[in-house]
């Protein structure tokens, strides 16, 4: 059973527990998870292994802050060539695909954790009281070592884009 990190973040100013480890720079990217692609295919850690990547977890693409964040990373994708950007939420794959199409988002890949809910506990982003992911940003090198981590202090605020992009450019 993954650990519970009591009051690890806030949600609209209220403390919320997270399930899973508090990952930090220097840790290996978790490998014990699967998620669902927009085409309903299974995606696992081995599918991302060996890539330079930014992994974002967001509560729901259908909320203002998640929309803003995902659109921003979609725009910034061209400034980090060779780095793939993944966005994980508990939204259904159909909803993710529809949102990406409506938003014109094509430079990031969305994955859904709705089915197994394995990604959140593996990465320490699952907020059981909400049934959603916390907002977090991970920058990972091709060696699968995490170089930058931000568990956003309040899930209803945006991450530090500059810090994440600087870490990604240094990969």
Image (cartoon, rainbow, N blue to C red):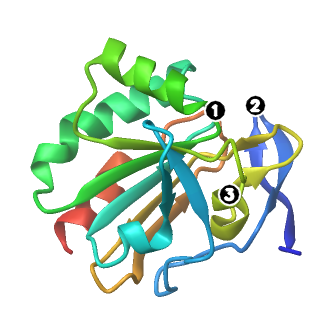
**Residue 57: x and y, percent?**
54, 48
Q: Which type of secondary structure does the marked residue at label 2 adopt?
A: loop
Q: Which mark is residue 156?
A: 1
The residue at the point 26 percent across, 70 percent down is 52
**Residue 36: x and y, percent?**
54, 47
Give the Cα distance between marks 3 and 2: 20 Å
Can you say whether 94 is above or below 122 in the image? above
Q: Can you identify the residue that label 2 sits on?
A: 12
**Residue 12: x and y, percent?**
75, 31
**Residue 53: x and y, percent?**
31, 63
The residue at the point 30 percent across, 40 percent down is 73
Q: How many marks?
A: 3
The residue at the point 26 percent across, 36 percent down is 74
- Residue 57 seen: no
Q: Can you identify the residue that label 3 sits on?
A: 120
Q: Say if mark 2 contacts mark 1, CB within 8 Å.
A: yes
The residue at the point 89 percent across, 75 percent down is 1
Q: Which type of secondary structure does the marked residue at label 1 adopt?
A: loop
């Amino acid at each position: 059973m993954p650990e519970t990190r009591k009051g690890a973040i806030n949600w609209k100013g209220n403390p919320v527990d997270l399930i899973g480890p508090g990952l930090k720079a220097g840790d290996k990217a978790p490998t014990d998870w699967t998620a669902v692609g927009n085409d309903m295919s299974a995606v696992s850690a081995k599918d991302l292994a060996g890539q330079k990547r930014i992994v974002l977890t967001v509560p729901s693409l259908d909320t203002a802050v998640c929309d803003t964040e995902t659109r921003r990373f979609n725009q910034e994708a061209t400034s980090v060539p060779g780095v793939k950007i993944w966005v994980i939420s508990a939204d259904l794959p159909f909803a993710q695909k529809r949102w990406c199409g409506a938003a014109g988002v094509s430079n990031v890949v969305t994955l859904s954790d709705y089915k197994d809910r394995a990604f959140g506990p593996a990465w320490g982003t699952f907020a059981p009281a909400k049934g959603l992911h916390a907002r977090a940003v991970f920058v990972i090198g091709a060696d699968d070592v995490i170089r930058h981590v931000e568990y956003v202090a309040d899930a209803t605020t945006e991450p530090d884009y500059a810090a994440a992009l600087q870490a990604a450019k240094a990969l």
